[in-house]
Amino acid sequence: MGLSGLLYFASLLVAFTYASQLLKRDQSVVSGSLGTDEYWNDYDGGLNNYTQYDGNGSIGEGWPSALSWGSFNDLWVANQHIISRSCSQVYGTPNNSDQEIQDLYNSIKQVAHETRVDKRFILAAILQETKGCVRAKTTTSSDGIKNPGLLQSFKGNHSCNDDGEVQNPCPQDQILGMISDGVAGTGSEQGFAININAQADVDGIEFAQAYYRAARLYNSGAIDSSGDLGKGSATHCYSSDIANRLLGWTDSASTCTLDD
């Protein structure tokens, strides 16, 4: 093979490798304007109260825009009393240690950076699913599918409380894996990143609306044909809860009646 042939072969190899990376990005990393590179969401606070949101998740139907979300730092601090006590209160397991809480913080930021999913949303989802307990019990669906870890991820691979086997301390790699399973997904199984990417096909989709819709997909596997995030199966208040957590809601009484 001559020099020109070798150069052509090398260029094909580079193109194939780059294309493979793009394919992987489509599956586990949020692309385009629905992702965030974390330069603008660290400085604003929030309020601990609850407002029920109805409809399709858009600003036009009264849902909060991303500009009204609290900062990651403020949301993190506001929820420390929940994160530090949730294991004993909810699961009857040892509470998170200071090191485990630090590992949780670091892992949220790492997965957010790797997937371009807004770290505030990841924190809100963790609080919604398990209140941040690293020893949250693995749940099993009626058809036998396990949902383990901090995000109760579909067919997840990481847990510090699986089949009654409680790990104390919970290793950092398990904490990171629990969050990655729920956000990036587990192989062919969907996580938040895939659900957010799918919203790019929705005409006129807004940044925050894409996240609210992705939350509903994560919880129930589908969005009602009406587009109303409070209709359909599973937890009807789920997206409304996520929106409130992003605004600063921690432990005041929920006024959501969608699941009544």
Image (cartoon, rainbow, N blue to C red):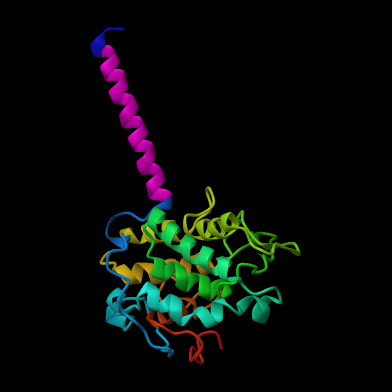
- Where residue 130 appears, x then y in whole percent? 58, 73
- Where residue 29 appears, x then y in whole percent? 39, 53
User: What type of secondary structure mainly makes up the magenta span?
Assistant: helix
Which residue is the extreme one toward the left?
Answer: 4
Apparent side of residue 137 relative to residue 13 in the rendered image (left or right): right
Apparent side of residue 184 relative to residue 198 in the rendered image (left or right): right
Numbered range of the magenta stretch = 5-27
Apparent side of residue 69 relative to residue 158 in the rendered image (left or right): left
Image point (36%, 58%), residue name:
116
The foreground one among 212 and 149 is 149
Among the 4 quarters of the image, the one containing residue 100? bottom right
Residue 13 is covered by the magenta coloring: yes
The answer to whether residue 29 is above or below residue 76 is above
- Where residue 222 appears, x then y in whole percent? 48, 66
Image point (37%, 40%), residue name:
21
Which residue is the extreme one toward the top?
Answer: 1
Does residue 233 appear in this view?
Answer: no
Total marks in image: 0
Which residue is the extreme one toward the right?
Answer: 164
Question: Could you tell me which quadrant the C terminus lies in?
Answer: bottom right
Residue 16 is covered by the magenta coloring: yes
Image point (45%, 82%), residue name:
78
Question: Could you tell me which quadrant the N terminus lies in?
Answer: top left
- Where residue 18 appears, x then y in whole percent? 33, 36
The answer to whether residue 142 is above or below residue 67 is above
Does residue 107 appear in this view?
Answer: yes
